[in-house]
Amino acid sequence: MATQARIGQAVLGVLMVGCALTGLFPKPVPLLFAIAAVGTANAAFPLMRTFGSALLGGVAAASIALCSVPFVTCSSERFTEVFTCTGDAPTWHLTGTVLVAGLSGASLVLARITDQ
């Protein structure tokens, strides 16, 4: 079971790095993917599992908190420098934050399974 969970962690880490590097998501979503990938890498090792799990939980919570912010800020002229507001960037931002939250949550579950 532990070997399968580590393989799952590796797959999730590759997905996170791939999403961060594709360039489809506006800032700060690639940064969230990169932090989640670091948390996944840390959660794969027994010594760092607690830190990695805490990092993954924080990224998941931050992603959910940030998912709707561009829709609110892009409706005002004041906050356009915080998030990219051109084209369908708010939709890509929402998609990216939901993806990073889901991948972080899945990695967190795998880390907890491996811990048992």
Image: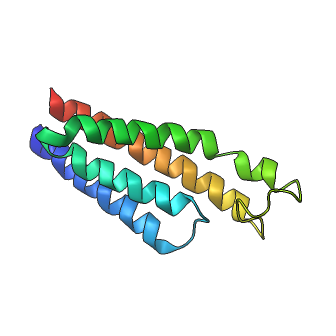
Total numbered labels placed on residues in the image: 0
Locate residue 24: give its quadrant.
bottom right
**3 left or right of 13 in image:** left
Locate residue 58: give its quadrant.
top left
Where is 39 relative to 54, above or below?
below
Coloring basis for residues: rainbow
Residue 91 position within the rendered picture, expressed as x and y whole percent measured from the top left: 70, 58
Where is 86 relative to 54, above or below?
below
**58 left or right of 88 in image:** left
Residue 23 position within the rendered picture, expressed as x and y whole percent measured from the top left: 53, 73
Q: Residue at x 23, y 43 (%)?
A: 43
Question: Dividing the image into 4 quarters, which one contains the N terminus?
Answer: top left
Residue 67 position within the rendered picture, expressed as x and y whole percent measured from the top left: 64, 46
Question: Dividing the image into 4 quarters, which one contains the C terminus?
Answer: top left
Where is 30 relative to 115, above or below?
below
Where is 13 relative to 102, above or below?
below
**Residue lying farthest to the top in this orientation:** 116
Q: Residue at x 79, y 52 (%)?
A: 73
Q: Residue at x 53, y 41 (%)?
A: 62
**79 left or right of 110 in image:** right
